[in-house]
Image (cartoon, rainbow, N blue to C red):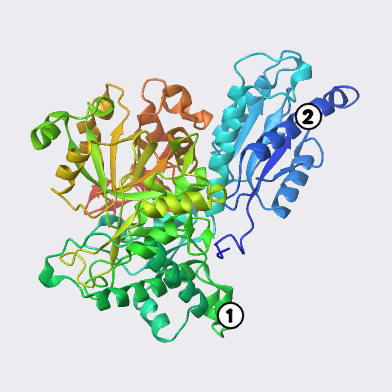
Amino acid sequence: MNQTVFTHNPFPKVGIRPIIDGRRRGVRESLEDQTMAMAKAAAKLISDNLRYPDGSKVECVIADTTIGGRFEAAQCANKFAANNVGVSLSVTPCWCYGTETMDLDPVMPKAVWGFNGTERPGAVYLACMLAGYAQRGMPAYGIYGHEVQNRDESDKIPADVAEKILRFAKAGLAVAMMKGKSYLSIGTSAMGIAGSFVDVNFMQDYLGIAPENMDECEILRRIEEGIYDKEEYKKALAWMKKNLKEGKDYNPPKIQKSREAKDKDWEFIAKMAIIVRDMMAGNPKLKEMGFGEEAVGRNAIAGGFQGQRQWTDHWPNGDVAEVMCNTSFDWNGKKMPQILATENDSLNGICMLLMWLLTNKASMFADVRTYWSDAAVKRATGKGLPKEAKAGIIHLLNSGSCCLDAAGEMKEKGKPVFKNWWDVTQKDIDATLKATKWVPAGVEYFRGGGFSSSFLTPKGMPLTMIRISIVKGQGPVLQIAEGYSVTLDPKQQKTLMERTNPEWPCTWFTPRLTGKGFFKDVYSVMNAWAANHGAIAYGHIGADLITLASMLRIPVAMHNVPEEKVFQPHCWGLFGASDDPTGADYRACAGGASFGLGLASIAYAVLTCLTSCGLLRRNGRRGDFPP
């Protein structure tokens, strides 16, 4: 199996903190078994339902004893630190001593499950603990079952409680897995695309990720100096020649590359695909070859390849390398996806990363190209949209790094799906490769040649499209749109594709409408989208993304997730969420990033304070901050 960023980085664990009433001589003793039963039930729920990116079960660490006060809380914290715990869940069936038992780690995601019972109600402690967390600036997620349970049912987790525990744990693990990793920019900015200007402060302060940079000429150096596995290169090239079938060359005959030149491109592309992977995660084979520095990689959990224009004006494009990284298989068989954004759009790459960490499935990268109304399609093709898309469609189209999983040839119960990579079969791989053509790159865009994947996403796949944008003075903001893939009849497909780039992978997306705001109609969704790219995941995972975004202190500007599915820190309600949930999200996130110190917010607060006290003046005017 390919080396990955997790080969030398152990997965974080979920810590379970069983909280108890510390009064001995009868009270504590009567609660020990019930409290520990809750902890064990939560740990079993998590391990039975969640997987790490390598397919192994998520591990939980339970405190050695129940926690009745600060001494035992400290002992639990020591155990968590020694066991790489990255997420904290406190559980209790009873009243306990709030701030004396709370988890004091300032950045670890934390939640509290208070048992809904009547003997010694955990809801009272839950409210006390959440108030303490809010007052101390450590937002926590409150979990409280809808229905009262009997005392002897503390090891039975109701469905609504289980949903919140799993949602919290998934999001918390995503936060923990990013921390300390890197984002590798291969090249710099592409064609003035805002997201390709990597924002160091966003990466570091909000995600805990260190941006790394390597010039694209590193690929050329490694090719020329032979810094790649020669045997793997032969295997990859043979696999590509056999399985990556070329499609129609849409270039005018006078500028089409010769057969000999295209064959040379494939040789270059096979080396490039291996090298890009190695640059991100390393390759132990290189150490055997005497290249110790190159062997370790850049510890990258995600990356981006600039390509246009400085690279693609002369060398074959990066489409194959990007696709092979992002797809759940390559010439070595099924494998863990490796996030690589085309045009080094780091913000779209981070979106792909978030969705991969939540789902363990490959993520799509696409241009958000065109809104088509039913009337416009009828005018262009003589026929309107199918029933399921009458409200309109958004065309998702890009030559670059869209994973082949989006071809929809992996099936479960006869329906197209994305699979966890460890469940991918050879039948899935063969069907996906058969459905994909590799079209010679359009020379008007890619003067250096290369090949672009070409396929059509089938209808009926639940999809979630997202985008992070950075707004000066505000910071990062997330947009979410859940919907479905649709297809057109073949004549419509041909007509509409011939109006754009017919050789590129195509997905027709119709968002689920709510009748209000940005989701009153499909046009409004397209018109509100804040960038030219979108990242797309299989499944409706908007609720998980909202929970994750709140952990990262990234407000959500638009979404179409049902209100009852939204799960954010309990104190969000104190920011006015009842009447203005979006505004409350912005206000709650205004305190700064989840990692680091949120220095910009702190600096602004200090300047505001100094100004209001009359201690800071500039040009004789109060309130004018220095540049």
Residue found at the very far right of the displayed protein: 25
| Disc 2 packing (10 Å; few <14; some 14–19; many ≥20) | many
**Residue at the image position 50 percent from the left and 50 percent from the top:** 427
Secondary element type, mark 1: helix
Residue 522 coordinates in the image, percent (x, y): 23, 31
Residue holding disc 2? 37
Q: Residues within 10 Å of mark 1 (few under 14, many from 20)?
A: some
Label disc, if present, on residue 287 of the rendered structure: 1
Residue 559: image location, x then y, percent:
35, 32
Q: In this orientation, which residue lies closer to the viewer: 293 or 395?
A: 395
On screen, residue 525 above or below 426: above
Amino acid type assigned to the residue bearing label 1 in the image:
Lys
Q: Where is residue 463 in the image (x, y as percent from the top left)?
A: 38, 37
Residue 253 image position (x, y, % from top left): 12, 68
Q: Is residue 606 visible?
A: no
Q: What whole-number distance in Å separates the C-alpha atoms at marks 1 and 2?
A: 49 Å
Q: Which residue is drawn at 22% across and 51% down?
A: 620
Residue at point 29%, 64% (across, down):
451
In-image side of 326 versus 505 (left or right): right
Residue drawn at the location 73% of the way across and 31% of the way down: 41
